[in-house]
Image (cartoon, grey):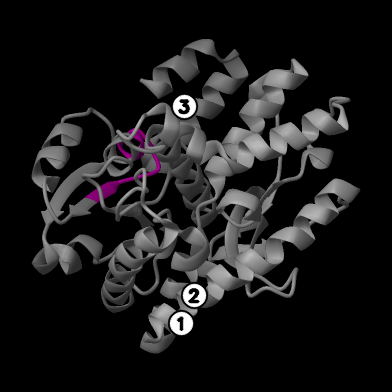
Amino acid sequence: MFRSMLVRSASPVKQGLLRRGFASESVPDRKVVILGAAGGIGQPLSLLMKLNPLVSSLSLYDIANTPGVAADVGHINTRSQVSGYMGDDNLGKALEGADLVIIPAGVPRKPGMTRDDLFNINAGIVKNLSIAIAKYCPQALVNMISNPVNSTVPIAAEIFKKAGTYDEKKLFGVTTLDVVRAKTFYAGKSNVNVAEVNVPVVGGHAGITILPLFSQASPQANLSDDLIKALTKRTQDGGTEVVEAKAGKGSATLSMAYAGALFADACLKGLNGVPDVVECSFVQSTITELPFFASKVRLGKNGVEEVLDLGPLSDFEKEGLEALKAELKASIEKGIKFANQ
């Protein structure tokens, strides 16, 4: 569907490029695994990854309901072969030979649930899945969606270290939804084409740790300081906005699946040698004093090719950067402590 729409709307020169880029014979085989494929994020993410022509094998895993999701998605007439796996006994089969593992598994935050409640459930899930990844596909890129990302990425890193398989270039916290929101909100106030907007978002993936760098946005719009502050707060509170709008019936699942599919696509392009693929992600980092930090990352055949510097910050952004460090540091340390219990 996406392919035909793209080809129809493109110029003759672009049409040739698109056809070549999407021809299955011109790209390598890639196995993508989704852990938590039957959940609120997992189902739309499975659909979007089935539509991605870079995927040759799509492996869907969950503790329940996976056969139905796999059968449904498997009827779509795109390149990838779909397999569904259910229950702990089949986790190894789901993971073997993976190039990319995406983890949306866990529970969403519900009204009345504290961050500690969320942490205690999802941290255990991520720990067990990470043990299996280290055993069955230690070379795979890992895209962590399960919240709280500020803690689950350090948990995975510690588990991989214990197994002797840790490669900091291959572990990513997916912060793309923060970028997607920042672009959408910025375009809405700037009267520019949202498809042309770029806004780096750095820091972490919760509340004030999310720091959109609107001073570096392109195309530049002359927005007031008050508006920049309001856009920053809305980006930071985007998840809460959706939870409240759904009135207890869920969290950001559709936009998160879209963002997860965008970042996975960037990782696959990097693996396939496409040059200059740059996305923001929460990775092991030395650009601040914190061991993990989200910033622009150049992706390549080994995962992270380069973690890019933050670039010039406005005074407001410098204040935000200092303000987020304590909370982000505590979340990282909480994850490390949990993994080593």
Q: CA distance from mark 1 to mark 3?
A: 49 Å
Q: Nearer the viewer, residue 193 or 323?
A: 323
Mark sitting on residue 297: none
The reply to whether the C-beta atoms of the residues labelled 1 and 2 are less than 8 Å apart is: yes
Instruction: From the image, tell me which residue sits under label 3.
Output: 19
Quadrant occupied by the N terminus: top left
Residue at coordinates 11% horizontally, 56% vertically from top-left?
86
Q: What is the secondary structure assignment of the residue under circle 3? A: helix
Instruction: From the image, tell me which residue sits under label 1.
Output: 337
- Quarter occupied by residue 305: bottom right
Q: Earlier in the sequence, mark 2 or mark 3?
A: 3
Q: Residue 60: image x %, image y %?
A: 22, 50
Q: What is the secondary structure assignment of the residue under circle 2? A: helix
Q: Is residue 54 magenta?
A: yes
Q: CA distance from mark 1 to mark 2?
A: 5 Å
Q: Residue 178: image x %, image y %?
A: 58, 42
Left or right side of 114 for 282: right
Residue count near mark 1 (Cα–Cα under 10 Å), binned few <14, some 14–19, many ≥20 = some
Could you tell me the amino acid type at mark 3? Arg
Q: CA distance from mark 2 to mark 3?
A: 47 Å
The reply to whether the C-beta atoms of the residues labelled 1 and 3 are less than 8 Å apart is: no
Q: Nearer the viewer, residue 279 or 123?
A: 123
Left or right side of 81 for 30: right
